[in-house]
Image (cartoon, helix red, strand yellow):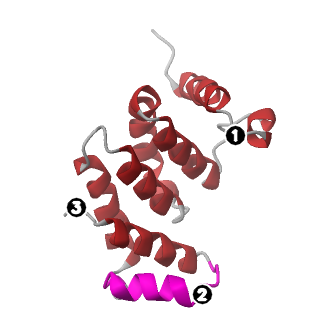
Amino acid sequence: MRFTHDQILAAGCRFSERGFQRLGPEEHRVINLANMSDVALPELANLLRDSIREAAPDDSLYKSTAYWALARKHDPRFRDFFLEMLPLELDSSLPCAWQIVIALECIGEDVLTPATKMVNDDRLMAADARRYLNRLAPLPA
């Protein structure tokens, strides 16, 4: 099932609410209009992940919004998914890569250097993300 843009925004709001962020009337309206108030959060997260996988490779706006929503879940169980997608997005969509890096940071991964955290620079983020991935790569035997 491919989520609509409204469903993605609603998922992000639901995850934020689960994270004890107080939602305002607008966020509740988004959730209700998308009929997402009764979907179990684990199912919602899995559907969102699948929706990202089904998205067209060049649909950067859709995917970056979906990564944003999934990052709001702060769920370390999605670490492997983010690690799978990060190299692909670094090569095709820096806005998507940014959202993945933010998601990884939200679950306690140290991807960005302190200097990169202070500025919004695609080049620095990409370099930090590649260094992070290289640190995780197994050494050749």
What residue does disc 3 label?
2
**Label 2 Cα neighbours within 10 Å, binned few <14 / some 14-19 / many ≥20:** few
Nearer the camera: disc 1 or disc 3: 1
Find numbered disc 3 in the image and state the secondary structure of the residue it sits on: loop
Was residue 34 drawn as part of the magenta stretch in this picture? yes
**Considering only order in the chain, which callout, 3 or 1, is on the residue closer to the N terminus?**
3
Task: Indicate whether residue 43 is drawn in magenta.
Answer: no
Q: Position of residue 7 (x, y in %)?
A: 34, 72
The residue closer to the viewer here, 119 or 137, is 119
Q: Return the x and y of residue 69 as percentages of the image width and height.
A: 47, 62
| Residue 11: image location, x then y, percent | 42, 72
Residue 49: assigned label:
none
Q: Is residue 97 above or below residue 17?
A: above
Mark 1 and mark 2 in contact? Answer it, CB < 8 Å.
no
- Look at 58% across and 28% down and name the residue there: 126
- Give the numbered dot on residue 120: 1
**Disc 1, SS:** loop
Look at the picture and state if 3 lies above or below 103.
Answer: below
Tell me the distance, in whole angstroms, between the alpha carbons under discs 2 and 3: 26 Å
- Check disc 3 and give the amino acid type: Arg
Which residue does the image show at 38% across and 50% down from the upper left? 63
* Residue type (three-letter) at the residue carrying disc 2: Gly
The boundaries of the magenta stretch are 20-36
